[in-house]
Image (spheres, grey):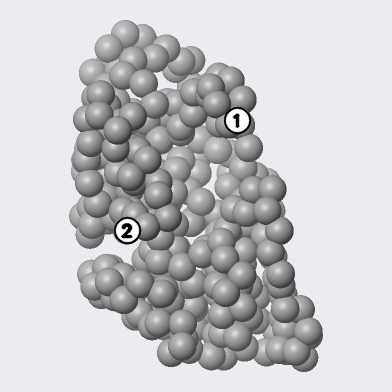
Amino acid sequence: MRAPFQEGHFPFPVKYGYCAVGRVEQGPAGLIGHTVFCLHPHQDRFVVPADRVSVVPPNVPARRAILTANVETALNAHWDAGSGPADRIVVIGGGVLGLLVAWLAGRMPGAEVTLVDVEPGRAALAEHLGIGFALPEQAPADADLVFHTSASPAGLETAIGCAGIEARIVELSWYGEGEIPASLGGAFHARRLQLVSSQVGMIAPSRRPRWDYARRTRAALSLLADERLDALISEEIAFADAPVELPRILSPESRALTAAIRY
């Protein structure tokens, strides 16, 4: 899970991060002055090969473009899922990734999309993005597709309960080196459910013959033209304040979504 241009090893010291947006100051004439997205650790200036940056479209603000990598992950997940119009889709977990997966699903004609989260406050965000919301105890059943992004055993249990007969559950959670219990008897077995992994490090097989990483990044950037996505950036902090602010943002009690680091 090394990030591009990472230095060091986990846990610390390590230079990590992969959602950088900035302006090209030196380089090929066609790029100078342009706002670009790059998978690079957090720092105020860096030098990378020209082919490692993607130009941000004029109708996408730089601040919103920091969501590019998350949109790529959500897009890849829908390719892995085989989502389609009029599908009944449930997304378990209302973090940034879950919200983006649900938002993309909601753009499909006739799709019935429900975001499920333990935090009632996510209901307003779901409404803002044009999708339904439910707490786990009210989660809908008989879904055609279920996406799981909560990285919790309870979330996976809910995902299995939401899936209809022979439905597909797409697992997007990152568990690291941890292990979680999974109930693969009962409903999972009786309904002949599918549990598949989706990970952004490889392009989904259905697109791999025609798509490369650069094309997928350009697609993600173009999708970010929707101004409703600004709601997913919950706060902005100065780069110099990051050592103080990051422990708060990353704590289990935090309700933050995306924190934009301002250089």
Q: Earlier in the sequence, mark 1 or mark 2?
A: 1
- The image quadrant of residue 77 is bottom right
What amino acid type is highlighted by mark number 1? Phe
Distance of mark 1 from mark 2, alpha carbons? 25 Å
Residue at position x 58%, y 31% in the image? 11
Q: Is residue 178 visible?
A: yes
Q: Which residue is mark 2?
A: 255
Give the structural element (helix, strand or loop) at label 2: loop
Residue 48 in the image, given as x and y percentages of width and height: 46, 15
User: In the figure, is residue 21 to the left or right of 90?
Assistant: left
Q: Quadrant of the N terminus?
A: top right
Q: Which residue is mark 1?
A: 10
Q: Label 2: few (<14), some or many (≥20) within 10 Å?
A: some
What amino acid type is highlighted by mark number 2? Arg
Residue at position x 31%, y 70% in the image? 122
Against 120, is 99 above or below?
above
User: In the figure, is residue 182 to the left or right of 89?
Assistant: right
User: In the figure, is residue 204 to the left or right of 22?
Assistant: right
